[in-house]
Amino acid sequence: MRAVAIAVLLALSGATILAIVREQTGTDGFLIGLLLATFPVPLLIAAFRWVGNVEPSPWRTVAFAFAWGACAATLVAIIANGFTAEWLTTSVVPDSDADLVGATVVAPVVEELAKAAAVLLLFLHRRRFLGGVVDGVVTACVTATGFAFTENILYLGTAYADDQLYAGDGFAAATTAQTFFVRIVMSPFAHPLFTAMTGIGFGIAAAVSARRRSVRITLPLVGLVTAMVLHALWNGAASSHNGLHFLLVYALFMMPVLATLVWLTVWSRGRDLRTIRETLHAYAAQGWLNPAEPWTLGSMHARSQARSLARRVHGKPAARSVAAYHAAATSLALLRARAERTATPPPDFPARESALLTTLLTHRPQASPPTTTVAPVPPSLAAWR
């Protein structure tokens, strides 16, 4: 029932936001905006999927996160931003610049709250798909990519409509080109970078013991506030009439933050691979796996080699079996590692562990030989073999 309710909510939100954007940009502006806004989306989604491919989330989870950002979050933002900015500039801080207040105070708070709702829903109801920093970052960034996609349609479509209005009978695209360069070429990462801070908070909270309730509440809030601050700083620089100010913030602050985020996610990805390798050795000692297989499963390159070997020898069905085998082993290792980090394992741990072991046994006859063959085995194990 929850899934049906959320699907209906997203569908209604999508239809409403579509009508609002089309009304503000016109049909031609909407189509041009849609075309131009689509450019960065496949690249960003592919990058986030690569970051999270150690234990990839199901496509339905990715689709939910993107749809929430593109539909529900943007609808909340487009309605709440205007009303809140108007209320602040008429009741709280009269005679202030409504556009500046909206960009630097209202938009960061409203938009980051709206995007964070998707991460919160998965944290509460699909915790197994949000088990660490990498999962949190990927989920948050996909949600923000959906939000930026719809926002870019609005900005690019409006720019195109303005160009047509002032171009007379001819065609001009100066504003459209400028908007495309700033939003699509220079800063497609902006919204994902902000919301990634929220994802980091939820990701760390998911890995903390359930007994540390105050920590699990505080960390997401710290991440959310950090996202709002980054968003406000970016919007303030973009709203400045001084182009040098914007370039300084872009080069000296936002790019280093982006580089730090990339380093953190890659480091966390490597740590997850080490955890998988170390945890699976215990299952290998009990006979569930060949002793060499944890070394393959702890290397994304070796996993790819195993799938390629299976495909060459036995075709695509064998490669799919190897992929399913690796996915089950990865989920098993991370499930056990998370349970060992907490004082009390989740109540469904035995059932989930049993189901994953059953999946391993199902695919093992076809998947274990190529997984073992390509193992980057250390010298001591090579001598044992």
Image (cartoon, rainbow, N blue to C red):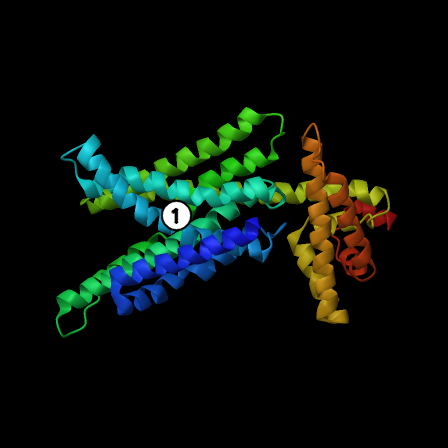
Q: Quadrant of residue 234?
A: top left
On the question of residue 248 being in view, the answer is no
Q: Residue at x 41, y 58 (%)?
A: 14
Q: Is residue 141 above or below residue 23?
A: above
The residue lying toward the viewer, choosing from 163 and 279, is 163
Total marks placed: 1
**Image x and y of residue 185, in percent:** 34, 57
What residue lies at 40% left-to-right and 52% top-to-bottom? 147
Q: Is 8 positioned to the left or the right of 76 in the image?
A: right
**Is label 1 in a helix, a strand or a loop?**
helix
| The quadrant where residue 41 appears | bottom left
User: Residue 250: x percent and y percent?
Assistant: 32, 44
Rendered location of residue 171, percent (x, y): 18, 72
- The picture places residue 85, in percent across and down from the top left corner, at 24, 40
Q: Which residue is mark 1?
A: 191
Q: Residue 235 occupies which quadrant of the picture? A: top left
What residue is shown at x 30% (from left), y 65% (from top)? 30
Residue at 52% x, 51% y: name it. 5
Q: Residues within 10 Å of mark 1 (few under 14, many from 20)?
A: many
Horizontal placement of 152 versus 284: left or right? left
